[in-house]
Image (cartoon, helix red, strand yellow):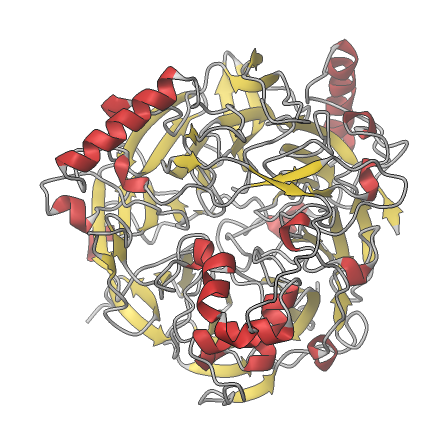
Amino acid sequence: MRRSPHTLRLGGPTGGLASALCALLLAGCLDAESRPGDPAAYADQHRTWEDYGGGPDMSRFVETSALTPETVGDLEVAWSYQTGDENVYQFNPLVVDTTMYVLAKDNSLVALDARTGEEIWIHAHLRGIARRGINYWESADGTDRRLLFQMNDYLQAIDATTGQSILSFGTDGVVDLKEGLDRDPTTISRVQSGTPGKVFENLILLGSSPGESYLSAPGHIRAYDVVTGERVWTFRTIPQPGDVGYDTWPEDAYRYAGGVNTWGEISVDAERGIAFVPTGSPTYDYYGADRHGANLFGNSLLALDARTGERLWHFQLVHHDLWDYDPAAAPQLVTIRNDGREIDAVAVAGKTGFLYVFDRVTGEPVWPIEERPVPPSDVPGEQAWPTQPFPTVVPPFARQSMGVSDLSPYLMDDAERARWTAKLDSLERDGRMGLFTPLSHQYETLALPGAVGGASWGNTAANPEAGTVYVISIDWPSFYPKLERQEAEPEASSARPVPARWRGPELFATNCQACHGADQAGTPVGPSLLGVERRLGLADFQQVVRAGRGEMPAFGHLSEEEVTALYQFLGGSRDGAVVRPPEGNVVATGGAPAGLAARPVSRAGGRLGPPYPEGIEAPAARYTIGGWGLGHAYVLAPPWATLTAYDLNTGTITWQRALGLDRDAAAEGATDTGVPQAQRNGMIVTSTGVVFATAKDGRVYAFSAETGDELWSAALPTGTEGMPTYYEIDGRPYLAVVATTPLQFGREGSEGGSGPTGPSAPGSYVVFSLPTAP
C-alpha cells in the first residue's frame, strides 16, 4: 500500500510566498506531465450516465441536441417503475447502453430495460446498501462489467450483466472498510458513506461516514482496485507525525481524533488525474477542547493525485470547525475567462452559503479570500480559531444573517410572531447570532444558513466550458440550544432501573425522536420509521441500532432488551418480521455471503465515545448538544429553497429563483416560496440551455439556463429526493426521476401545521421523454 507523502502544502490558515512558489512549480509540472492515460476514455462523460452524478467531473452536464428549450415543454411520461415498498429512496439511477440500474423492492438492486422499464434481474435484499447510488466499471475490452457499492461497511461488486456477486473481489467477495484506518476495527461502529465514491480508471475512490461522536474513527480517503479489491493508497486526513498539518492539532491527536471524512461527493479531472475531495468536520463537531488548532485537513478542499493519493494542494474553508460546516456538494470543474486569462477552475459550495473558487491546478483563489476576525468562544476549554476565510468577490448564494425584518409573514399568527420578534431582538442585542458565532453553554445561539442549510450533496451542477455553476440551497436557521456538560467518566446510577420492556416511548424520545420526528414520519436528517417492522426483523433492527448504519450513529450503550423494547414500541413483534423475496426474476439475495456475518463492536459510550487512549490528557468534561435547533424553518421569510446561477467568468450571480412552491404558504397568498427543509434535490444541465431540477413540492422543473425562467414542470406521484438522470437511446432523450418521499409543507408537522401528507401514489421511478413520431 502506498501512502500520500504529504510533501506540499498550499492554502489553509498559514499560506505564504513559499506556497505560492510551490504552486507555480506545480502548475508547470502538471501542464507538462499530468495528462497520462487515454483522454478518449472519458470523451463521452457528458453523453452518458454510467457514473453516479453523470460522469467523473460530477457536473451533471449533458451534451445533447435531442432536447432544447423549445421542445422541453413536450416532455411526457414514457414509463414508470413502482418500487414495491414504502421505503424512501434517494438513488441516482445509472444507465449503461440500454440497461438502467435502480434500488427498489426492499433495497434490492434491479436491472431494467431503460426503454420500457421491464425488469431484467433482481439482486434482492441488499439491506444496508449506500442509499444514494452505486458505481459502474468495465474493462477495456468490455468483457468484465461490474457494479460496485458499499453495504454494511463492506465494499462489494456485482456482475452488471448477471446480477451475481463477484466472489473473487476482495476476500470472498467483500472488502472490510473498517480496516486500514489506524484503529482497531472492532472499536469502529460504522464507516461507510451514503454516497458511493468515484470510479477513476481501475480505482474506486471512497470517502466515509464514521459518525460524529467523540473519538469516532478518522475519515481517511482511500482508493481500491476495482478488480481485486486491494487497497492501493490512503490519504490520512488526520495527520500523523511527519505529515503536513500535524502541527495544526495537539500532539498525538491522531490517536483519538475522528471525522475529517468525505461523506459527500468527489469530483475528478479525468484528463489531469486530479481528484477534488471536500472533507468534513473533526469530531466532536460542536466542541473542540481536545483538538486545539486549525485542524487540517478538516473542512478543506483537497486536490489529490487520483492514482497515488499524493496531496497536490489544499485550502481549508473553515478553521477548527464548531458548527458542522462540512462541505458535501460536488466540486464543480469549469473553464473561466477572466481579465484576459483562461483558467481551469474548481468551485466548491459550502454549508456556509459561500462559493469558493480556485485555480484547479495551483490551488490559488481566483479572487481574494480574506481571513476576517470572528467571535471567540465562552465555553470552558474551547479555543475557537480567531479568523475565518471570506470570499471577497463572488457573492454568497444563501442568506447568512437573520433579524426581525426577516420573519415570515406566513404560517404564524400574530402572537407567535411577537414571541419570535422578542427572541430575535434578544439574540441580536446580546451578540448571539452569526455565521461564525460559536455555540455556548450559557445561552442559545442562532446561525444561518444553519447546520443543514446552504448547499449539500447533489446540490451543484455546471456547464464546464461556459464557466457557469448552479447551486441549489436552503435557508434553514439553526436555533441552537445550550451546550450540555457531560462528565467524561459519568458515575453509575444507584437508582433501581425501570424494566427495559416498559421504556419504549422513553427510549424513542431520548434516542430517536430528534432525527426521525415525534410522529416517526422522518425528517430531512432521518428517514421514516413508519412500517419499520415490515422492513426489518428484530435481529436486523438490533444490528442497525447497536452498530449504526450510513449516517446513523451507533447506539451501543443500549442493551439488547432496550433495543427490543424500542422495536416493540415501533410496532414490531418480538419474534421479528418475516422477510419475503420480491416478485420477479430474483437472481441472488443479500450480496456476498461474507458480508452478512455479524461483526463484534466493542466500542461503547454513545455520543461521548470511549475513554481516551492511555497517555492522553482528556478534557475535564465533554460538551454535547441536544439537537440542531431545526424545528422552526418556517419562521424565516421565504424563499426557503433557491436555485442560483453563477457566471464565474465575472464572479457574479446571473439569476436566482425560488425552487418549488410551498402549498401551505401559497394558501395564504405567498408566491415564489421554495419549500422549507428541501435539502436533498439535484439538477441536470444540458448543452442546449435547459436546467432540470427536482423540488421538495413533488415536481420536476425545467428552467432556462440563461434567464432562470420556468420552461416546463410535471407533477410526480409523490415527493422526490436525490438526483435525476438523463440519457439517450437511439436519439431519443429520457429524464428519470425517483419519487418515493412523503410530501411535507409549511410547518413540517409543527403544532397547527399540515405535516406529512403521505404518498398520493406508490413510490416510483418516473421516466419522461418526448413523444415518438406517429
Residue at 59% over, 19% down: 365
The reply to whether residue 99 is visible in this rendering is no
Q: Is residue 284 visible?
A: yes
80 in relation to 254, above or below = below
Judge from the rendering whether residue 444 lies leftward or rightward of residue 174; answer left or right. left
Residue under the image location 77 percent in, 46 percent down: 307
Q: How many marks?
A: 0
Q: The C terminus is located in which quarter?
A: bottom left
Quick one: 686 or 614, which is closer to the camera?
Answer: 614
Q: Can you tell which quarter of the image residue 249 is in?
A: top right
Above or below — where is 696 with respect to 519? Answer: above
| Percent x, y of residue 531 | 40, 76
Task: Determine the image quadrant of residue 483.
Answer: top right
Is residue 75 left or right of 33 when viewed as pictured?
A: left
Give the residue displayed 74% in from the left and 29% down from the top. Answer: 30
Q: Position of residue 51 (x, y in %)?
A: 55, 57
715 displayed left or right of 529:
left
| Identity of the residue drawn at 36% across and 61% down | 737
Side of 120 where 152 appears, left or right: right
Q: Nearer the viewer, residue 682 or 676?
A: 676
* Residue at the extreme top of the image, as rendered: 17
Asked where in the image residue 654 lies, by quadrant, the reply is top left
x and y, in percent, of residue 642 in the image: 32, 37
**Residue 394 pos. (x, y %):** 45, 20
